[in-house]
Image (cartoon, rainbow, N blue to C red):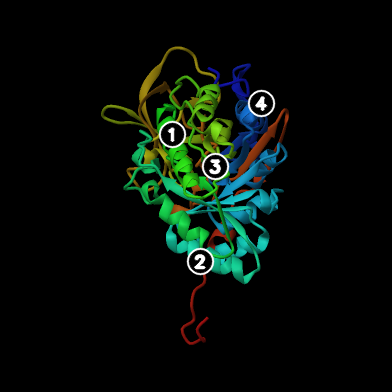
């Protein structure tokens, strides 16, 4: 088995680049996230090459994986950042991305977050409500600034992906109805401190079928032409992200076709273009390494209980997501059994795979849960008082811990037991 050149069996042992995963497990324990730096760079360069004829720029969607080592890898290649919170903004800046290369998205940015972004020198704010437009105007005017805003338009296009990651339909909470664009832009243009010269959309995540992109981009192009006819000069387009990855071994997304769709729909408008890929840059570059603790024979299937859990990787529980799973020691061709790969948490939803045909596993075996670089560590928690797992980045034969394992002292030390006779505060 090989998923790609960077994560593959060599000499009967699964490696990330030139590092045996068994070595990482021996050194720092399990569970642990492992990322390939080379694969991050390969994915970025492939996307950058596809959009280069369009003159587009990349703002990495930090929410996919906010580790500063990941952000810094993309920053070194010229990426900006798409952020949805003050925390992500601060991470991006700390990782080396200048504030004027950051786009601030999000459906409910607070006054504090917007003030921080303006004080830092944010380039563009994507607005998703009319009240937000007035708040940004007041904050920018108080600072003697004019800030570029992009109205995130909801095109009412079904991305035909999982309901929990679809964002471009009319009933979704995201953006403002595209049919109201003229009234919204006229309102923004009448307010001080605002440069309403950009438009944005993002219809969802994990798209492998690009027809929804084409429908959405065509609606956006028609909207831009209509706005220009009414004196609203749209010069910048933020096309969001959403390109998926082949979790099930499907054909990889055709980036040349995606770029052609962009060219045919909005390429003739003379606008600068921003793209916000996340998952497609990081998902396949990461895996969760875990160790089998218990194997139990059930009535119909074997339960493989390992030390990774839903608090470490919640995607299967939250989205019914599929992740390829392979033993670190290369198995033979025979003796496969129908298995459930589950975790130790007190929830029936604590699973990584159900009814999956896998090699017969034993306690102590190491497992690699692949395609976990996006929305894995980013969505992890300390449920059941399980410390956050470490993260490791590999380049060639070298590897570094890029987030240490949280200790129990760190975890418990965050709590405060009140002494009720003391003053409040």
Q: Earlier in the sequence, mark 4 or mark 1?
A: 4
Distance CA(mark 2)–CA(mark 1): 30 Å
Q: Secondary structure beneath disc 3?
A: strand
Residue furthest to the left in view is 299
Across and down, in percent, residue 23 comes to 65, 32
The residue lying toward the viewer, choosing from 343 and 65, is 65
Q: Residues within 10 Å of mark 4 (few under 14, many from 20)?
A: many
Distance CA(mark 3)–CA(mark 2): 22 Å
Res. 237 mark: 3
Residue carrying label 1: 218
Residue 249 visible, this angle:
yes
Res. 135 mark: 2
Residue carrying label 4: 17
Q: Secondary structure beneath disc 4?
A: loop
Q: Residue at x 51, y 50 (%)?
A: 231
Across and down, in percent, residue 395 comes to 71, 31
Distance CA(mark 4)–CA(mark 2): 48 Å
Q: Earlier in the sequence, mark 4 or mark 2?
A: 4
Q: Nearer the viewer, mark 4 or mark 1?
A: 1
Q: Earlier in the sequence, mark 3 or mark 4?
A: 4
Q: Residue at x 40, y 18 (%)?
A: 336
Q: Secondary structure beneath disc 2?
A: helix
């Amino acid at each position: 088995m090989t998923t790609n050149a960077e994560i593959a069996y060599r000499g009967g042992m699964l490696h990330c680049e030139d590092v045996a995963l068994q070595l990482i497990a021996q050194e720092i324990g399990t569970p642990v996230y492992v990322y390939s730096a080379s694969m991050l760079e390969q994915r970025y360069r492939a996307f950058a090459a596809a959009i280069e004829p369009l003159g587009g720029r990349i703002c990495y969607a930090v929410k996919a994986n906010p580790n500063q080592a990941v952000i810094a890898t993309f920053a070194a290649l010229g990426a900006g950042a798409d952020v949805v919170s003050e925390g992500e903004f601060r991470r991006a800046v700390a990782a080396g991305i200048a504030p004027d290369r950051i786009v601030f998205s999000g459906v409910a940015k607070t006054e504090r977050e917007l003030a921080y972004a303006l004080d830092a020198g944010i380039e563009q704010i994507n607005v998703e409500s009319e009240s937000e437009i007035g708040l940004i105007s007041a904050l920018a005017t108080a600072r003697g600034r004019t800030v570029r805003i992009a109205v995130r338009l909801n095109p009412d296009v079904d991305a035909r992906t999982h309901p929990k990651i679809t964002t471009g339909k009319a009933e979704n909470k995201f953006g403002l109805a595209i049919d109201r664009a003229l009234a919204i832009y006229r309102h923004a243009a009448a307010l001080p401190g605002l440069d309403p010269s950009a438009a944005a959309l993002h219809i969802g995540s994990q798209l492998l079928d690009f027809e929804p992109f084409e429908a959405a981009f065509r609606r956006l192009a028609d909207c831009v032409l209509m706005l220009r006819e009414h004196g609203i000069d749209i010069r910048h387009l933020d096309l969001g992200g959403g390109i998926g990855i082949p979790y099930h071994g499907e054909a990889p997304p055709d980036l040349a076709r995606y770029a052609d769709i962009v060219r045919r729909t909005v390429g003739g408008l003379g606008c600068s273009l921003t793209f916000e890929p996340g998952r497609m840059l990081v998902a396949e570059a990461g895996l969760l390494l875990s160790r089998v603790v218990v194997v139990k024979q059930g009535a119909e299937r074997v339960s493989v209980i390992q030390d990774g859990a839903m608090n470490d990787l919640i995607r299967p529980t939250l989205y019914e997501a599929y992740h390829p799973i392979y033993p670190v020691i290369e198995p033979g061709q025979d003796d496969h059994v129908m298995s459930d790969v589950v975790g130790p948490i007190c929830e029936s939803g604590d699973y990584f795979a159900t009814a999956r045909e896998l090699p017969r596993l034993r306690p102590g075996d190491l497992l690699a849960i692949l395609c976990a670089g996006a929305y894995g560590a980013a969505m992890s928690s300390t449920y059941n008082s399980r410390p956050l797992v470490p993260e490791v980045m590999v380049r060639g034969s070298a590897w570094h811990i890029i987030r240490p394992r949280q200790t129990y002292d760190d975890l418990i030390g965050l709590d405060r037991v009140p002494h009720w006779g003391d003053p409040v505060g």
